Amino acid sequence: MSENRIPITDNRDWQPKIIAFLCTWCSYAGADLAGVSRIQYPPSIRVIRVPCSGRINPIYVLKCLQNGFDGVLISGCHPGDCHYITGNYYARRKFALLKTMLEFVGIEPGRVQFSWVSAGEGEKFAEVAKKVTEDIKKLGPSQRGATSRLVK
Amino acid sequence: MTYNKQNKSVLVVGAGISGIQAALDLAELGADVHLVEETPSIGGRMPQLDKTFPTNDCSLCILAPKMSECARHPGITLHTYSSLASISGEVGNFSCQINEFPKYVDPQKCVGCGICEQKCPTKIMDEFDMGLRQRKAIYRYFLQSIPSNYVIDAAHCLYLTKGACRLCEKECTAGAINFEDKAKTITLSCGAIVLATGIDPYNPISYGEYGYKKFKNVITSLEFERLLSASGPQKGHIVRFSDGKPPQKIAFIQCVGSRDVNVKNEYCSSVCCMYAIKEAIIAKEHIKNIEPSIFFMDIRAYGKDFDKYYERAKAQSGVRFVRSKVAEINETNGGSLSLRYTQEDGKLKEESFDMVVLSVGLEPRKGIDKMSDKSDIKLDEYGFCRTGQFTPLATTKEGIFVIGGMSGPKDIPESVMAASGTVAECAKFLALERQAKVSKKVYPPELNVIGDRPRIGVFVCHCGINIAGVVDVEKVAEVAQKLPNVDYAQTTLYACSQDSLNIMKDKVKEHNLNRVIVAACTPRTHEPLFRETLREAGLNQYLFEMSNIRDQCSWAHMNEPELATQKAKDLVSMAVAKARNLNPLDRLLIQVNPKAIVIGGGLSGMVSALAIAEAGYEVVIIEKDSELGGNLKNIYYTLDGKEVQKLLKETIDKVKSNPLITTYTNAKIDNISGYIGNFKTQLSVNGNGLAANTEIEHGIIVVATGAEEYKSKEYLYGEDARIITQLELEKRLSVIANRTPQTEHRKPNTDTKAPKTVVMIQCVGSREKDRLYCSRVCCSEAVKNAIEVKRIYPNADVYVLYRDVRTYGLMEKYYTKARENGVVFIRYEPEYKPQVEILDKEDINSKLRITTIDPLLESKVIIEADLVVLSCAIDAPTRNKELAKLLKVPLNADGFFLEAHAKLRPVDFATDGVFICGLAHGPKDMEESIIQAKGAAGRALTVLSRQTMEAEGTICWVNPIRCTACGVCVEVCAYSAIEIKEKEILPGVVERVAEINEALCKGCGVCAASCRCSAIDLKGFTDEQIFEAIGAGSG
């Protein structure tokens, strides 16, 4: 597959496009707080709000990669904080599996990231957004070809 | 008693967690609630905390949904920045005057953008951040304030004090500043009043030896809490104020302003041990090499799951605990602090620390004395509001109730229980009818949009310059206009202003729109408002989607206008793509059966049943024993000398004479089915050897099944009549003091002579393997009985062998009293438990020998006693397992029922319509049981008081054709909302498939994401909607 790889140009202006799935009670609120506190982070992230990180079907992540997004961020409440009691634990299990699967099919680690951000952690959300963007910038644009075989 | 019920309003004073919970529950009951708060925002102390023990939940995260619910509730009127001026009148018809301070900012116009704050030249200490940060004269109380509008602090505003400035007025694009604003006084007529003014942290300035305010690195626990907070002044970084460097060694000093006669606060503040442990653990999570030490007298980890937290802090988090009172703190070079303290062996030690946190106690909130004058209520010797022990929510004035820290130091769950309990208290004074409608408002009939081509309207908000200053909103609207199915796209200055909302309604009609998108701020605060507008325009409220281009776009990318505009375009395209697939959703109307069952006829069960019946609803009590009373039958007197058997008799009489209460004794539950509003319970009742089966249909369940005294296998219990439990001692003492009911008035034969030496052993079965929890009541029980022994036999020597004395809260004074009366307290380490021997088994007059090791003297202490009293644990009955299964609710590791949330939902279960109280929830004393029982009744009444309830709209549904009945969804559902059932999935085809109970589903979508066959989807967040949004965003 390596011959299909799109050459990484050191283009500083290149902004990766990243989808972020945020749970409405903690991480989405954390992202709001980052804004309210005017903490700046790269404009690379497009947020899809879901009620709970447990609602995120791993197939969404694959769909994002297939659709040409360069990365995916998933963020929910800290373990123990879930508004729906145990949703984030199920999310954690699903994504532990998904991670190995992604690696197996050749998606670089770092393209899909997971984090826990609480409603009080505006700063942390900005940090996560920065880190994900930086990591994906280093990886370069995602290659649709490799992933489109995954999801038809 | 019947009251003159003519009023349905309730005044709640103080909007901390207690006031908020009381307001919400009372409003749900159908009352008109006026919530008065002195500061500019509701929330109280909880938003100042970083985390809550023992779950380390983010304090703000769990509170914020309650705050916004409170602000949105049609039954609650908020009066923030206001104070209670006077109360007159009597129960059923109080007249209350409220002073509203001038805000100088029109809340209707203010959009909370904060430009005024940036421009304001005046800086003052920020009260919310404990003075660790500065705020402006125009300010928001804290970032997540509700209401989110700004106010001007008249005492510091340049214009209002010196007559010059008005910068904010010039800068405010919304024109919200109004310097003509005046103070107002309004008069409210209320049927009942709930006081919840809360607590103030103790100011440790009078502890001169600790050098607070003198040494920069000596701070209070609440200041430390702000340091830990991610939204605090240091953004969650722990630093020393002297040099801004992270500290390594931190000392926490307990009981600063508590348990101290010198500062006139003799009581224990109840929460400091736990919050200090929490702060130490969290500090360690922030900085790995931090070494926290806690200097304490007794660790009072008495609450549910507290002791496990304490043990974890010792074993896993490496928190050091030093049993010592620090004598003095001195500053050494570089801002370090030298602590002088006496070690347990009596030797003096000096140790250097980088930072000292003073665990300050809780005091009644300032101004409570004035409140007491105004409202005719009485205070206790410490200045807390006086309540009755058997009526812990009632003040000395009828119709005025007190909850939360105002009646004594307490933790959040106790405050929340009491808050819900006010519903039960107020209901009998209010003119309320069963609510027929879910909403009081009348809306136009909903337009049928099914099958119609989507016609989407997009409203892009400028939010003054908040969005438009960064994002090119006109371009965003242009792009939106070109998207398929978008029939209308326009910008608007402030989408949330009333005129814009009217325009929105007009445009829906004019363009026949059937989906609406608002691209503006966050749906977390504004979605309810726009949904309401859709309903007013005759559209289903779920045909709405919000695009967050302010909080998550323009504010976060202020220096990158082009990229921010691109992001905004993408976000709007995604919203349009999702909106194209939105469907109108119905909220299922659930009929509510107005009957309750209470499982368990002990004190909690009876109190709960009475509260529900007094509010006018039928109750069935199901008791497994042959008579009512439960554990209360074994308690005779209280710490302050009240007769408990009298209370028991009165309560049973009230239950028996209440026509709305039916009691089944000797009853066993065979099956429980159904859901909130519609339960069915099958009973078998054994009477006179005959079993009869009964089925009851009811709307809610209160679980009050109690607990039992642990039967010790240690300390030779059962081998000698002189080794007894505290309850057995209490009974003996009561017989002697003539406290027992007449029928039991016969002297036990073993108690003919006065004991010379009594030894009490604490923590029998508690706080060790098998029962890693504190039984909470044993210390005060031992103190109570020790005082009674000394009263009856003044010459007897009483020894209490303990691990920590946990007479928390206002009970501390009885611990002092016991010591003053000559009771000797000797500590023992759990590794060296006391040994009990019978010297000569043949001779009944021989002594009992107790050997213990006194860690203070580091030597053996031998006591020869003629009575040994064991303070046995409170044990969860094993039958809880069976009931938990029937109720589909969980138990905790110790076998007690597990509530929905340790802090904020202490009487609810995750399963709707089932409530918990008393010992079934965990060890607690009578007063606490009464409070929780009223809390459970209060929560139950919020359900019973309505004829119908609305379920969630965004819930899951099963496509039965795809379902393979694998049962994964059943397992992952936290709300027991899914069952596998036989169902006709196609005409003539019956299969086992998953079925979701719409009344129970909370719409988290965990089942949908876990379904192997994609048979489940979540309405409002369907796979298709999300796929479409992903596709549009990649554009």
Image: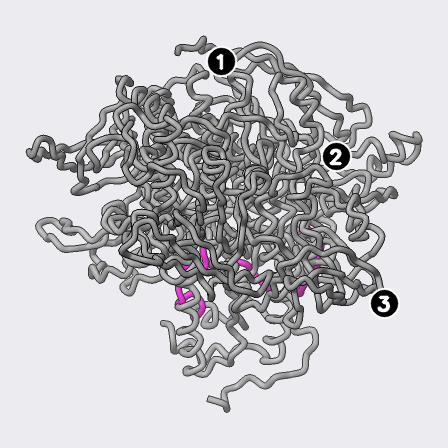
The amino acid type of the residue labelled 1 equals Asn
- Looking at the image, which is closer to me, B810 or B964? B810
Which disc number belongs to residue B151? Answer: 2
Label 2 CA crowd tier, 10 Å (few <14, some 14–19, many 20+): many
Q: CA distance from mark 2 to mark 3?
A: 41 Å
Judge from the rendering whether residue B920 lies leftward or rightward of residue B550; answer left or right.
Answer: left
Q: Which of label 3 and label 1 is nearer to you?
A: 3
Q: Which mark is residue B334?
A: 3
- Residue B807 drawn in magenta: no
- Report which residue position mark 1 lands on: B7
Can see residue B697?
yes
Residue B781 image point, x, y percent: 45, 41
Query: In this rendering, do the residues under marks 1 and 2 share a single chain?
Result: yes
| Residue type at numbered disc 3 | Gly
Q: From the viewer's perspective, tell me whether residue A131 is left or right of residue B113.
A: left
Tags 2 and 3 both on a single chain? yes
Identify the subunit bearing mark 2: B
Q: Is residue A46 magenta?
A: yes
Dot 3 and dot 1 within a common chain: yes
Residue type indicated by callout 2: Val
Magenta stretch? A36-62
| Whether residue B446 can be seen here | no
Height in image: B144 above or below B943? below
Q: In this orientation, which residue lies closer to the viewer: B313 or B591?
A: B313
Q: How many marks?
A: 3
